[in-house]
Image (tube, coloured by chain):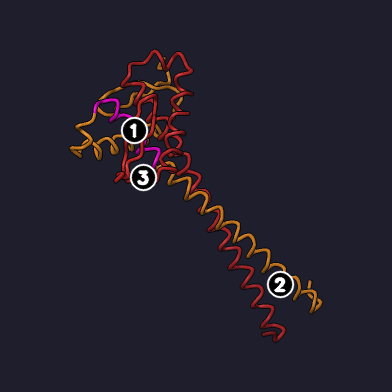
Chain colours: A orange, B red
Amino acid sequence: MEDNKVTVTIAGKSFKLSGYDPEYLNKVADYINQKHDECTSKESFRMLSFDLQSIFLQLNIADDYFNAIKEIEQLKEEIEKKNNEIYDIKHELVTQQMKHGLK
Amino acid sequence: MEDNKVTVTIAGKSFKLSGYDPEYLNKVADYINQKHDECTSKESFRMLSFDLQSIFLQLNIADDYFNAIKEIEQLKEEIEKKNNEIYDIKHELVTQQMKHGLK
């Protein structure tokens, strides 16, 4: 029987990982490979030592993550405002219904 | 005069980066260092070669990023539902106002 390991290739290196959905893992690998390609297209990146290249890539991915976190905070604020708006309109609706004896 | 380079230490290696807000860069560096510490506490990680450790860390950070992207999509769906709810209640309110000659 096959085990649940999925083979992915990142930065030209293939390795097996278990515990991931293959489709998801390939999506993440594609994203990382795109980052690798973007970085290695720059001479300033290629001149770095391997470990600095690696840390720079981690920073680059973490930067995307923190931008996403910022967007999450903004969306949560927007939801909070919409909740307040819904509360206010519902309050107005109920006030009118009471005023005119509506049910 | 000082340039705008900020020194950060990631995985025990210090290096200088420019073009980032120092507070933000330190926050990102802290996050990556925390990831490093979590990974290196596992023997299975320490047994990997340096380049595989590096790619595993990139995958780990990218996994956080994709989870954040998923949360963004869910929050956007929630906002869409709230917009529809607001539209419906406003419609009901206007209908009542017209019915009772309110302005």
Q: Is residue A75 above or below residue A1?
A: below
Q: Which quarter of the image is occupied by the C terminus of chain A?
A: bottom right
Q: Which amino acid type is shown beneath numbered disc 3?
A: Tyr
Task: Tell me what residue is drawn at x 57 percent, y 63 percent.
Answer: B84
Quarter of the image where one finds residue A24: top left
Q: Helix, strand, or loop for circle 2?
A: helix
Quarter of the image where one finds residue A78: bottom right
Q: Helix, strand, or loop for circle 1?
A: helix
Judging by the rendered image, the residue that carries numbered circle 2 is: A92
Discs 1 and 3 carry the same chain letter: no
Q: Chain of mark 3?
A: B
**Disc 2 and disc 3 in contact, CB within 8 angstroms:** no
Discs 2 and 3 carry the same chain letter: no
Residue farthest to the bottom, as pictured: B101
Residue farthest to the left, as pictured: A43
Residue farthest to the front, as pictured: B1
Discs 2 and 1 carry the same chain letter: yes
Q: Badge 2, how many Cα within 10 Å: few under 14, some, many 20+?
A: some
Q: Which amino acid type is shown beneath numbered disc 2?
A: Glu
Judging by the rendered image, the residue that carries numbered circle 1 is: A29
What span is in magenta? A49-63
The residues bearing labels 1 and 3 have C-alpha atoms spaced at a distance of 26 Å
Q: Position of residue B50 (x, y in %)?
A: 33, 19
Q: Chain of mark 2?
A: A
The residues bearing labels 2 and 3 have C-alpha atoms spaced at a distance of 48 Å
Judging by the rendered image, the residue that carries numbered circle 3 is: B20
